[in-house]
Image: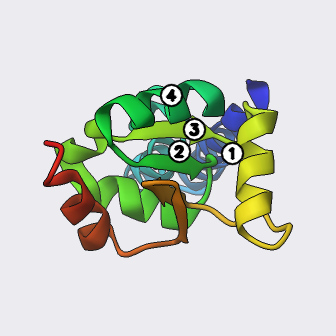
Amino acid sequence: MTRTWILPLLLTLSGSVVAAGQVLMGSPGTAAATLPAFLALAGVNSPLIFPRSTSAREAERRSATDGRPVVFWRPGCKYCIRLRIRLGRSARQLHWVDIWRDPAGAAAVRAANDGNETVPTVVVAGRPHTNPDPLWVREQLSPSA
């Protein structure tokens, strides 16, 4: 669990140090612009931007019931962030599995990607798709939404 917060915490700490240094050097305006930029990066890379993760087993069970895709992701992945942001509100309709929290999810991703933990891996109707286009993922929600 703490592993998912390492990058956001480092970004927040780094931004605070850089902003403090800029204030001490007499550039409060630059500090006022720098700190929010670091905090925004921390927020985007935090688990808070993603819908609540479930276990791979639970996500697969829910997907079998409602037909919605399963997304395997990990915090800090720029492609996962891109997918989440581009999906907008429809991202909440997907079943999200954080592979850093769920070893079975990480194993499923490795099995789908020749032993690599490449994310996002989206499973639609039992078929994995690695780093798919967000528009395509949104289209997969249309029949079940």
From the image, tell me which residue sits under label 4: 61
The reply to whether dot 3 and dot 2 touch (C-beta < 8 Å) is: no
Circle nearer the viewer, 4 or 2: 4
From the image, tell me which residue sits under label 3: 97
Q: Nearer the viewer, residue 10 or 46?
A: 46
Residue at (24, 71) in percent of width and height: 135
The reply to whether dot 2 and dot 1 touch (C-beta < 8 Å) is: yes
Position of 101 relative to 70 (above/below): above
Q: Which mark identifies residue 7?
A: 1
x, y (%) of residue 35?
47, 47
Q: Nearer the viewer, residue 98 or 137?
A: 137
Residue at (70, 42) in percent of width and height: 99
Q: Amino acid at mark 1?
A: Leu
Q: Amino acid at mark 4?
A: Arg
From the image, tell me which residue sits under label 2: 42
Residue at (71, 56) in percent of width and height: 109
